[in-house]
Image (cartoon, rainbow, N blue to C red):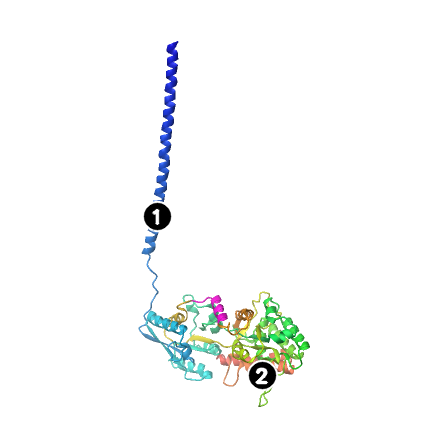
C-alpha cells in the first residue's frame, strides 16, 4: 500500500514538473514574438526611408524644364505706333520708374529668346490717315511694320479689306487673355488684341450733396441691390425735379452720346457686334431710345447751352453744368472725373452705371456697357511668319506674368483708387466694366461722312424735337448700312 502511495506521489510530482516546464517554454516563446514585431517595424521604417530616397533620386534625375528658344537669324521685328514714349521702354521720354525697367528687361530677354531685334517706329501720317498708310504699304508689298498699334476704329475696315492677319489659328498654342481679344474681333474672327482690361469706363456721375439735400438714397447703393432700373432712374429724376430749385436740373446730357450707351443697357446694340448689320431698329433698341425721349418729354434734362458762335455745345456744355452744380447727373468717362470733377467740382461726386432696362435678364448676362475706342495691336498682312510675330508680342506683354481677369480688374481698381471717392463707386465701375462690348457705330467712316453722324443727328432730333423714334431710326438704316459697306470694302 505504501508503494502505491509512493508511486502516486511520484506521478503527481512528474505531472507538476511537466506543467511548469510547459509554462516556461510558453514564456520563452512569447518573448521572441515581441522581438520579431520590433524587427518588422524597423524593416518597414527602413523600407519607407529607402522609398523616399528613391523618390528624391528620381526627382533629381528628372530633367529641368528648359524654355524653348527660337532662332530667327537676327531678324528685325518692327512695331509701329503713334506713342513711342509709351510703347518703347528705351525711349528718352519713357517714364523713369520700376515698370519701365522691368519692360526693358523683358525686351532684352525676348530678343535673346528669339534671336531678333525689336524696333519701334512712328506713323508718318496723322490719325485720320493711318489706316490708309497701312493699306498703301501692304498693297506695295512692304508693310510699314510687322505689328501695329492702331485705333480699334480701323480694325473692321482693315480686316474686311484683307490688310490684317487673323490670329485665331494660333490661339490654341499661344494663350491670350479672353478680355484682350474683343478689341480685334470682326465677323467671328480675331485680328488683334489689347493688353488692358478693356473699356467700359463710361457711366453716370452724380452730385452727392444735391442727392442728400433732395432726401434721396445714394444711387450707387441702389445699384448694389440690383434695383437701378429704367423705372427707378426715371422716378429718381422726377423726384429731383420736384424738390430742387428751378435752376438745378436732374440731368445734363448730349442725347446722342447718352443714346450710345442706353441701348446696351437694355440688352441691345446699335450695330450687330458680329455682322455689323443695323441693330438700332430692333425692339430692345427702340425701347431704349423711347426711354431716352421720355426724359425730354417730361422736362427732366437741362437744355444744351450754346457757344460763342451760337452752336449748341453738346460736348462741354453738359459737363460744365455738372461741374458748376447746375445738374445732379451727367454721363462721362473715368478720365473726365480725374481731370475735371476732382479738380473743378466743389461737391463730392459718385458713380453709378447706366440703369438696366426691362429687356435685361435677371442675371444681367445681356447688359452691356459700350466701348468705342481702344488701342488694338494687329499683325499686318505680308508680315513674315505671323505666328512667330504673335509669339514675340505675347512674350513682350506677358513674359513675366500672365494676368487673369480678376487680376486685371484688381489692377484697374488700384489704378483708380485715387480718382474715386469711395470703394462702392469702384465696385460699381468694375461691375460695368465686366460687361463691356465694342459698339461699332463710331468706327465706320468714309471720306465724306460716318455711320455715327447719321445716328447721332437722329437721336438729337428724337430727343430735342420729339421726332418719332421708330420711323426716324428706320429712315437712316439704309444710309448707315451703305457707310459700313463702303468702309469695309463691301460696296
Of residue 40 and residue 115, the one placed in the foreground of this image is: 40
Of residue 34 and residue 137, the one placed in the foreground of this image is: 34
Q: Which residue is drawn at 37% across and 30% down?
A: 27
Q: Residue at x 35, y 30 (%)?
A: 28
Distance Cα–Cα, label 1 vs label 2:
80 Å
Q: What stretch is highlighted in magenta?
A: 402-414
Tell me residue 433's x, y (percent). 53, 71
On the rendered structure, is 367 left or right of 183?
A: right
The residue identified by callout 1 is 49
Q: Which residue is drawn at 36% across and 39% down?
A: 38
The secondary element bearing badge 1 is classed as: helix
Label 2 environment density (alpha carbons within 10 Å; few <14, some 14–19, many ≥20): some
Let me know if residue 474 appears in the view.
no
Of residue 206 and residue 57, the one placed in the foreground of this image is: 206
Tell me residue 431's x, y (percent). 54, 69
Q: In which quarter of the image is residue 33?
A: top left
Let me know if residue 262 appears in the view.
yes
Q: Is residue 249 magenta?
A: no
The secondary element bearing badge 2 is classed as: helix
The residue identified by callout 2 is 317
Of residue 331 and residue 112, the one placed in the foreground of this image is: 331
Q: Where 19 falls versus 253 (above or below)? A: above
Amino acid at each position: 500500500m505504501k508503494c502505491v502511495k509512493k508511486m502516486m506521489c511520484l506521478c503527481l510530482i512528474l505531472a507538476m514538473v511537466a506543467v511548469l516546464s510547459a509554462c516556461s517554454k510558453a514564456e520563452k516563446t512569447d518573448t521572441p514574438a515581441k522581438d520579431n514585431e520590433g524587427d518588422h517595424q524597423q524593416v518597414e521604417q527602413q523600407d519607407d526611408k529607402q522609398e523616399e530616397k528613391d523618390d528624391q533620386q528620381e526627382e533629381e534625375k528628372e530633367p529641368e524644364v528648359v524654355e524653348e528658344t527660337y532662332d530667327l537669324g537676327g531678324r528685325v521685328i518692327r512695331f509701329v505706333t503713334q506713342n513711342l514714349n509709351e510703347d518703347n521702354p528705351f525711349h528718352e521720354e519713357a517714364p523713369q520708374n520700376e515698370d519701365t525697367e522691368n519692360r526693358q528687361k523683358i525686351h532684352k530677354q525676348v530678343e535673346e529668346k528669339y534671336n531678333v531685334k525689336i524696333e519701334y517706329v512712328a506713323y508718318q501720317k496723322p490719325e485720320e490717315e493711318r489706316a490708309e498708310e497701312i493699306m498703301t504699304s501692304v498693297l506695295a508689298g512692304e508693310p510699314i511694320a510687322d505689328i501695329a498699334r492702331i485705333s480699334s476704329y480701323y480694325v473692321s475696315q482693315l480686316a474686311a479689306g484683307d490688310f490684317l492677319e487673323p490670329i485665331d489659328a494660333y490661339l490654341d498654342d499661344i494663350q491670350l487673355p479672353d478680355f484682350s481679344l474683343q478689341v480685334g474681333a470682326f465677323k467671328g474672327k480675331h485680328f488683334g488684341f489689347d493688353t488692358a482690361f478693356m473699356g467700359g469706363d463710361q457711366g453716370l456721375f452724380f452730385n452727392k450733396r444735391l442727392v442728400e439735400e433732395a432726401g434721396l438714397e445714394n444711387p450707387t447703393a441702389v445699384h448694389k441691390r440690383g434695383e437701378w432700373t429704367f423705372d427707378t432712374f426715371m422716378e429718381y429724376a422726377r423726384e429731383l425735379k420736384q424738390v430742387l430749385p428751378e435752376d438745378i436740373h436732374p440731368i445734363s446730357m448730349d442725347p446722342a452720346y447718352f443714346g450710345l450707351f442706353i441701348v446696351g443697357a437694355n440688352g441691345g446694340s446699335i450695330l450687330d457686334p458680329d455682322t455689323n448689320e443695323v441693330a438700332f431698329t430692333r425692339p430692345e433698341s427702340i425701347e431704349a431710345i423711347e426711354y431716352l425721349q421720355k426724359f425730354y418729354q417730361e422736362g427732366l434734362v437741362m437744355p444744351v447751352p450754346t457757344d460763342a458762335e451760337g452752336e449748341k455745345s453738346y460736348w462741354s456744355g453738359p459737363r460744365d453744368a455738372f461741374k458748376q452744380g447746375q445738374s445732379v447727373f451727367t454721363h462721362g468717362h473715368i478720365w473726365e472725373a480725374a481731370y475735371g470733377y476732382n479738380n473743378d467740382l466743389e461737391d463730392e461726386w459718385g458713380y453709378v452705371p447706366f440703369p438696366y432696362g426691362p429687356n435685361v435678364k435677371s442675371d444681367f448676362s445681356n447688359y452691356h456697357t459700350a466701348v468705342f475706342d481702344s488701342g488694338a495691336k494687329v499683325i499686318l498682312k505680308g508680315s513674315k511668319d505671323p505666328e512667330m510675330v504673335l509669339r514675340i508680342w505675347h512674350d513682350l506683354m506677358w513674359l513675366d506674368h500672365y494676368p487673369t481677369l480678376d487680376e486685371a480688374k484688381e489692377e484697374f481698381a488700384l489704378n483708380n483708387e485715387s480718382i474715386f471717392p469711395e470703394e462702392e463707386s469702384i465696385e460699381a465701375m468694375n461691375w460695368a466694366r465686366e460687361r463691356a462690348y465694342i459698339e461699332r457705330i463710331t468706327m465706320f467712316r468714309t471720306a465724306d461722312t460716318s455711320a455715327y453722324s447719321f445716328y447721332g443727328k437722329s437721336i438729337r432730333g428724337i430727343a430735342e424735337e420729339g421726332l418719332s423714334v421708330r420711323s426716324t431710326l428706320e429712315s437712316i438704316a439704309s444710309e448707315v448700312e451703305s457707310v459700313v459697306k463702303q468702309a469695309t470694302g463691301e460696296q
